[in-house]
Image: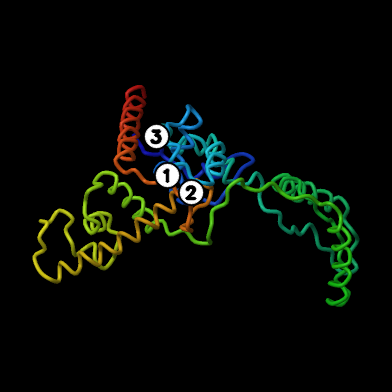
Amino acid sequence: MKASKLPWVLQGGDFSQPGWHTNPTAAYQMMFEFLRLSPSYELARLASTRRLSKAEQKNIPADFEQVQSTYNLIGDVNCVFFRQWWLERGLHIFGNPYTKPNLHEIAAFGNGHETDVELITAKVRNHLVEARQAEGLSAALLISVPLGLKRTEILKKFKAVLDHHRSQDVGQAEQAKIKLMGKRFHSNAMFKGLRLLWFKAAKPNWELWRLGAKADISASYSNVLDPNSPRKPRSPIEMDDRIILGKITFRALEKFERIAENAARGKFPCADPVDASDFNYPLLAQRLQQHSKWVKSTKSQWLKNN
């Protein structure tokens, strides 16, 4: 079966549904994956279903209300495919209900030409009306600009008219409930960080340099070290490489743990300091294993029925 037919495979058109749109980016799914790893977000999920144990209550961060607010908006990310969640909730959280308002040229009249009212009416109907619907009927100004005037005079008069109307309550277009942070999203680096946390959960007792080599966290050192090599290094050079990669991996773990915890506060991608809950990697491994079993079972059942 073609991948495009599988209900869990994201489609390009999923980013633009009737009345909603956003720019296609892998950042939304990455945030979804990091939320699954966040201990604060997991506590918010548990708190929504039962009373937290004393041990769980000790791990509650100071800003837990903010985490709960994010959870109430995004919901459970464990037993649901990203595409299913995206179509049901995600696009309405990260998307905008209308296109960004823009300037629209309706008609131009040559010097000395008669005004064709019917042509203007048709263009207003076919262009302006449709555009305003797509833009959420945002406030607009229909104005005639005499091109024969000097540019400075046109701009002066236009500014006066514009200032007059903008001083009135023109309203604001509805905004996305959560906005991505930063102008550029480096998906390759973010995926390496995600893999690093996965491997840490799978191998919590591994030396840091082994995790860094397995996750390919460093372009300079990961490829020269074998994560499955014997404990004793073969040379002083390899020992130095292990030490350096261990330090790089330590910093990377801290960074991507912060990214997961900031995601639980509705901030992504963000590595700012945060009052994070402790990462219990053996417990995280159990959650990831349960999720993996659910994915395998659900996909198998769907393929069997289709």
Locate residue 2: give its quadrant: top left
Provide the residue designation for mark 3.
Answer: 6
- Rendered image: mark on residue 196: none
Give the structural element (helix, strand or loop) at label 3.
Answer: loop
Q: How is the image coloured?
A: rainbow
Q: Mark 2 vs mark 1: which is more N-terminal?
A: 1
Tell me whether circle 2 and circle 1 mark residues in contact (CB < 8 Å).
Answer: yes
Does 258 appear above or below 68?
below
For the point 24% across and 66% down, which residue is it? Answer: 221
Q: Position of residue 286 (x, y in %)?
A: 31, 35
Q: Position of residue 139 (x, y in %)?
A: 80, 51
- Alpha carbon separation for disc pair 3 and 1: 28 Å
Amino acid under disc 2: Ala
Amino acid under disc 1: Ser
Q: Mark 3 vs mark 1: which is more N-terminal?
A: 3
Q: Position of residue 168 (x, y in %)?
A: 86, 54
- Rendered image: mark on residue 263: 2
104 with respect to 156 (left or right): left
Q: Mark 3 vs mark 2: which is more N-terminal?
A: 3
For the point 79% across and 46% down, which residue is it? Answer: 125
Provide the residue designation for mark 1.
Answer: 38
For the point 16% across and 67% down, which residue is it? Answer: 239
Q: Nearer the viewer, residue 2 or 95?
A: 95
Amino acid under disc 3: Leu
253 with respect to 239 (left or right): right
